Amino acid sequence: MTELAAFVVLLLAVLAMTPVRAHAQVDVWPSPLEAVEVYRIPLWLPQFQIDDPSLISRAQTMEQVLYQDLEFCGLFEIIRKKPVVVGMNSTNLSIQVQGKVSTADGRAVFEGTVTDVASGDFIGGKRYEIKEGSIRRTVHHFSDEVIHMVTGERGVALTSIVFTRKNEGQWELVVCDYDGYGPRVLVRQSVPLLEPRWADQNRAVVYTSYRAGKADLYIRYLDESQSRTLAAGEGMNYTADWSDRREMILAALSRGGNSEIYLLDKTGVVKRQLTFSRAIDTSPCWSPSGREMAFTSDRSGTPQLYIMEVDGTNLRRLSFAGGYNESPAWSPRGDQIAFVTRIDGRFQLAIITPDGRDGRLLTEEAGGRENPRWAPDGRHMVYTERTGGQEAISVIDIKTKGKRILAQGANADWSTR
């Protein structure tokens, strides 16, 4: 059984408890969101300086990681040869990022500097001791510093991604760096694992498991060897989302035979039931402020997106175009909600503003795309791509629509900074 099949079984179990309603008339989506030409800041990245031949291999690795980090963020046009500085001004600013690997007091040291090529002004620099096993993390830290020095924004190179995969007949919950390196298995079991979500300031992961024969919620702290049961009452307990601002969990629980949205604390104690409907209410997600939530409900006859205040007031429907919309994910800036929409039998990614005035498709390719989750920069998104029976975790830049495959697996979530 694949993760998708397991989730379909879960939904069918809930649907069996719910009366069937007639399908509503729906409209089609407007034209897709077009990729745009984004201005990239010219950034000169010369070869690293090395003062000790024994450090050549280490320096080459660090230079490659820095290049990949700066390229991934989408902010820079990276130049490897020395640029011509004639005519440089504030509109075609060029930055030099220089790295040096050396020894000092018997220790390996990395120094990184950022300079304005045109004026020669020193923008900033960092110095690190290179410790065994921390080379990539050291470079990730410096690349985020480069982004902050140049743009005032924070990068995502030090963030992590959690996802599920099936490996040799076992389901695994895996954590890796933002670029797919350093995968570490947190949970391995013979029954499906679904919908992992970062929780408690990235110290834990909440996920759905069938280990007790039905869908229940568990939480696994990264520094612990065992998971804790979070919600395992009657019926289904699934699709959770954590708010760092509120330190609370939204989850769909089917107590009493119908799937509703509940508010839980991090120990699993139910604080409040938020929805009261004969419909299937599921897949809740927090707004960045912690004051609102979006969720999926078929109360109109087909799955659509809804928003409401977390105190249960001000409920309103968000999506009207398309006959099947689900899995909302609120952007960290609060200005967009990503979700999945079904078009011609295929699931595609889309985004919409929280007021519902501007909805656009992000993808239109063959295959299926599911479970979008935002990076903390509000520019990148991780999602599951299904093609030819294979599952892969992919990342998309929503400005340029550039994509890359991160790992084999599904159900990814991106940590906060």
Image (tube, rainbow, N blue to C red):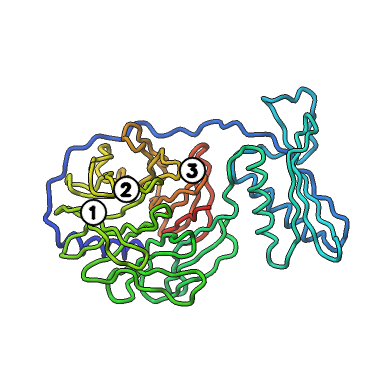
Disc 2 designates what residue?
Answer: 293
Q: Residue at x 21, y 63 (%)?
A: 254
At label 2, counting other C-alpha atoms closer than 10 Å, the crowd grade (few under 14, some 14-19, many 20 or more) is many
**Residue 276, x across and y down, in percent:** 17, 53
Disc 1 designates what residue?
Answer: 274
- The answer to whether 200 is drawn above or below residue 298 in the figure is below
Q: Of the residues shown, which amino acid type is indicated by label 1? A: Leu
- Pointer 2 and pointer 1: residues touching (CB < 8 Å)? yes
Tell me which numbered mark, 2 or 1, is placed earlier along the sequence. 1
- Pointer 2 and pointer 3: residues touching (CB < 8 Å)? no
**Residue 133, x across and y down, in percent:** 69, 67
Q: Residue at x 74, y 46 (%)?
A: 125
At label 3, counting other C-alpha atoms closer than 10 Å, the crowd grade (few under 14, some 14-19, many 20 or more) is some
> On the picture, is 201 further left or further right than 290?
right
Q: What is the distance, in whole Å, between disc 2 and disc 3 at their CAs?
A: 18 Å
Tell me which numbered mark, 1 or 3, is placed earlier along the sequence. 1
Q: How many marks?
A: 3
- Which quadrant of the view contains residue 261? bottom left
Nearest to the eye among marks 2 and 3: give it.
Answer: 2
Disc 3 designates what residue?
Answer: 378
Residue 77: which disc? none
Q: Of the residues shown, which amino acid type is indicated by label 3? A: Gly
Q: What is the distance, in whole Å, between disc 2 and disc 1 at their CAs?
A: 10 Å
Identify which residue, 52 or 310, lies in the foreground.
310
- The answer to whether 200 is drawn above or below residue 299 in the figure is below
Identify which residue, 262 or 84, lies in the foreground.
262
At label 1, counting other C-alpha atoms closer than 10 Å, the crowd grade (few under 14, some 14-19, many 20 or more) is some
Q: What is the distance, in whole Å, between disc 1 and disc 3 at their CAs?
A: 27 Å
Tell me which numbered mark, 2 or 3, is placed earlier along the sequence. 2
**Residue 141, x across and y down, in percent:** 65, 53
